[in-house]
Amino acid sequence: MTAGEYLEAIRQLPLGSLHDLTQESPFLVLSPHPDDETLGAGGLIAAACAEGQRANVVVVTDGSGSHPRSRRFLRQQLIALRHAEVAAAGFLLGLADDRVTHLGLPDTKAPSSGAAFDAAVVTITETCREAGAKSLFVTWDLDPHCDHEATARMAYAVRRRMPELRLWAYPIWGWHLESSLPLDRAPPRGFRLDIACQQDIKRAAIAAHISQMTDLIDDDPEGFCFTEATLAPFLGSFEYFIEVAA
Ligand SMILES: [Zn+2]
């Protein structure tokens, strides 16, 4: 199967309800960077919060890698800004501040093994247990970004500790894989969630990540900013969740 065929199969996943995805129980969204949670699962979070369902978010890295050469936003200021952006986006989605945990690992250096990896897995597992989470949502393991790959590995490790947890993957950078790339994967199973009712809230929450969406930080020529093309997969009226088999 090519990446193009796989991504098309994701777009054709059957319509699912909030119940199909979360069993109307608490869940946790694991986000490699401060914005992936909004981009990939903002509609899910907003729909669940509107129903009074408990959602938790764990952000793995500190987001300090987006504008490493800015002189106006030094590392600690950028980290603080990105925390504030997650809080602002979460507020719009209906997520209380105390439902967001930042692991604060260094951007582009999320560990895939070793002591820091194990510590992250322990914290995520404890957060899941404390919340009574029955489902865990994480970025897709085939997202071509080292932090996204590491975060997916953390989710798998959490599920090994909590085998009852249902695991779902949401693509971010995977949407932009070269379509001819061969993927050694069986066709995806899972659901697409209709978020038409949450679309406006989600767009506002995405816009709250100002440092990633605008030229607010304009003194780093290599600084990151979403474009119309890179943002497009996240502005539609569906979100897509691939079930990760145990
Ligand atoms: Zn990311």
Image: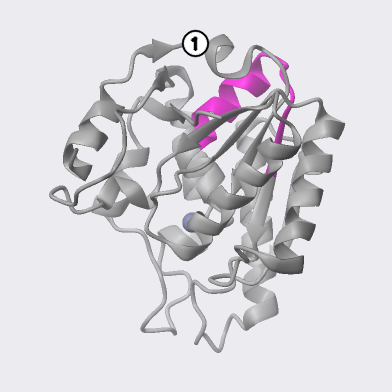
At which x and y percent is residue 156? 61, 43
Viewer-side residue, 189 vs 198: 189
Which colouring convention does the figure follow? one colour
Amino acid, disc 1: Ser
Left or right of 123 on screen, residue 238: left
- Residue at 36% in and 84% down: 221
Q: Quadrant of residue 184?
A: top left
Left or right of 75 on screen, residue 133: right
Q: Is residue 73 magenta?
A: no
Left or right of 29 on screen, residue 115: right
- Residue at 53% in and 12% down: 20
According to the picture, the residue beneath numbered tag 1 turns out to be 17
- Residue at 30% in and 29% down: 10
Q: Quadrant of residue 29?
A: top right
Secondary structure beneath label 1 = loop
Residue 154 vertical position relative to residue 99 in the rendered view, above or below? below
Magenta range is 41-57
Q: Quadrant of the C terminus?
A: top right
Q: How many residues crowd around disc 1 within 10 Å: few (fewer than 14), some, or many (20 or more)? A: some
At which x and y percent is residue 28? 68, 34
